[in-house]
Image (spheres, coloured by chain):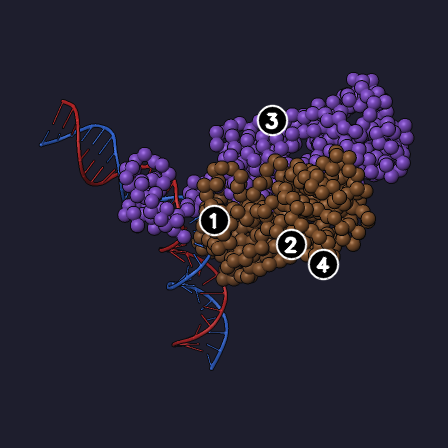
Chain colours: A purple, B brown, C red, D blue
Amino acid sequence: MATIKDIAKKAGVSITTVSRALNGYSDVNEDTRKKIIETAKSLNYSPNTIARSLVMKKSRTIGLLISGLMRESAKDNFMIEVMTGVNDFASQTDYDIVLFNTNSSKQREKTYTQLCRERKVDGVIIQGIRTDDPYLEEVVEGEIPCVLVDIPKIGRYAGYVSSDNAAGSFEAGNYLAEAGHTNIGMINGHEYAFVSKERLTGFQKAMMEKGISFQADHIENGDFTEESGERAALTLLERDPAITALFCASDLMAIGAMNGLRAKGYRIPEDISIVGYDNILLSRYVQPSLTTIAQDTHGLGYEAAKMLVDMLDHDGKPRRTLVKHELIVRNSSIMR
Amino acid sequence: MATIKDIAKKAGVSITTVSRALNGYSDVNEDTRKKIIETAKSLNYSPNTIARSLVMKKSRTIGLLISGLMRESAKDNFMIEVMTGVNDFASQTDYDIVLFNTNSSKQREKTYTQLCRERKVDGVIIQGIRTDDPYLEEVVEGEIPCVLVDIPKIGRYAGYVSSDNAAGSFEAGNYLAEAGHTNIGMINGHEYAFVSKERLTGFQKAMMEKGISFQADHIENGDFTEESGERAALTLLERDPAITALFCASDLMAIGAMNGLRAKGYRIPEDISIVGYDNILLSRYVQPSLTTIAQDTHGLGYEAAKMLVDMLDHDGKPRRTLVKHELIVRNSSIMR
DNA sequence: GAGAATATCCGAAACGTTTCGGACTACGGA
DNA sequence: TCCGTAGTCCGAAACGTTTCGGATATTCTC
């Protein structure tokens, strides 16, 4: 592997000059620069980024910390789309992305900041972390530039991007109310997700404004999976068989709910209207197709990467970025 | 950031000793080792992998080169599942994964090997590259340990993993023939994918063995997208309206075909049976659910990572690994 | 008690860059 | 003639590790 030294020797100049020539500095004669570039090519030289990182203290990589990037998660396009968003922006820059493995037990000995510092990423994008994660504070308070996806926390070096979950849920609630539903249940995510809280308050607000009674016994928590959605739907309808609509904090749970209810003989949307959240790929293909709140998932990742690079390259301040959301009415919900 | 030097100074030993203590060498007294480890902790030390990589000439990272990891590709779970497979294996090791950005025009100036050498990955997993990619040979012939997904080429440092596409297609053909179909069309992928060739020959073989005539005019090429599947299906049925079954080289094309045909008034499966390939997530949810050849996509990535790490850590030889495949009969196909 | 083996430690080089500070030449102006 | 300046170039240190070869002190063997 040819190094800068080899070039220097072959071209008959010093190491310094080679470095400066290759990096476009002005104090090197154009002729020598030409010669250097040519010999570099002839030696099939490519720079050693590791050596460069060591002295520059910059690795030009950003870490992508996706907790739960596992086999099962392929169903949920959410994190995949976030990832492609990150990748799409990163490919416009010269940052590379390194995937952190966080699921293994081995990693749990190390805090996130340790992970980042060891791998010497310049910054990190974090997605899917739970609010009860012991290391969340550490990374928000820490010194490593970081942007969180769907976790509304801002620190000295930490910004976040999310959609307006409260507003989205508000729209969902509004829509159901205006469709004539007056007895509505909600299947929320677990309490350790920030989005759960926001989606609940947004929905509650809509109910209140529409003068619809909405009590705690009409809320059931799942964990964002299909099965939990099914379970929650059944307990809700057992508790109050007069429910005519269900708002679910994730599409996957909504799909689970649909399956569970249909198995019990309920017709959707005739008996029960279902509204989901996320607009995952499946929601369009499932039967009946799912009414849902779409968020710009790709944008989530894209904006996260953008903010991070801005912090890294232009000394940008960490901030809050919201991506747009939108109610998509399909066939799982109906006027009453 | 505390370095090994700081530890050495504080603990009153040499740099060498600190290094050897931390790395578990035997020629350091247990007491001093304890002291060193303690001071390391007290200084909140974490090793600088970059410096280590520089001297060891190993970065403990593997590159993941997925051409076309973009927004659109989220629909096709294929590469996502491959990726989680890679990630799942990697998380058992201490290798990290770096994602290479290959879609941008900027990158195209650089060959894959240049990319790899610059980023100093120890090895690379390549997926989704086309057979007409000018750099394919370079990487197969090259010196960088590499394993290809779904590209049957072996080199000095290059192995591959795929499923037996010919056998899978053979089964598909066999199944359709035994279901009583005698006039069958095929929608293949574009000619620049290895799998296309294999799937065609496997299917042809089945047709021949069953004594079914299968001519070139019953084959139409798409490019693995939904739209191309739709287009291909329509031309095939225009050309020969007596066709009763379609074998598609990808689920996405199969889904496109179903939509296109249904729009033209064909009933599926009553009028036309459809068989896909890949068993992507959607195939289970689409209506009617899709009969397809499942490959162990997750296994593809998992085995690729396994082979690569074996080559890297245990001097394993590059080889060929096949993952299993399986015919999954659902509701898009029917006995005649 | 001498020599050998063992246990424990350390100095210094090396990995491939970047960059600070200075050095040398040639040339113009006073 | 001398000085200042611009244009080019280079030596050497620095980044944070690992590791080779050796040094010293201690223990063992006969």
Q: Which residue is at the front of the view, B333 or A58?
A: B333
Q: Are marks 2 and 4 on the same chain?
A: yes
Mark 1 vs mark 2: give the one in front. Answer: 2
Mark 2 vs mark 4: give the one in front. Answer: 4
Q: Are marks 3 and 4 on the same chain?
A: no
Q: Are marks 1 and 4 on the same chain?
A: yes
Q: Position of residue B336 (x, y in %)?
A: 82, 48
How far apart marks 1 and 3 lie (CA) works out to: 37 Å
| Residue at 82% across, 18% down | A211
Q: Position of residue B248 (x, y in %)?
A: 69, 45
Q: Which residue is at the front of the view, B59 or A120?
A: B59
Mark 3 — residue? A321
Against A46, residue A274 (above or below) is above
Mark 1 vs mark 3: give the one in front. Answer: 1
Specify few, some or many for label 1: CA neighbours under 10 Å numbering under 14, 14-19, or 20 or more.
many
Residue B159 seen from this side: yes
Please, what is the three-letter code of the amino acid marked with disc 3? Thr
How far apart marks 1 and 4 lie (CA) works out to: 44 Å
Mark 1 — residue? B113
> Mark on residue B201?
2
Q: Which residue is at the front of the view, B78 or A225?
A: B78
Against B57, residue A133 (above or below) is above
Q: Position of residue D14 (x, y in %)?
A: 39, 43
Mark 4 — residue? B209
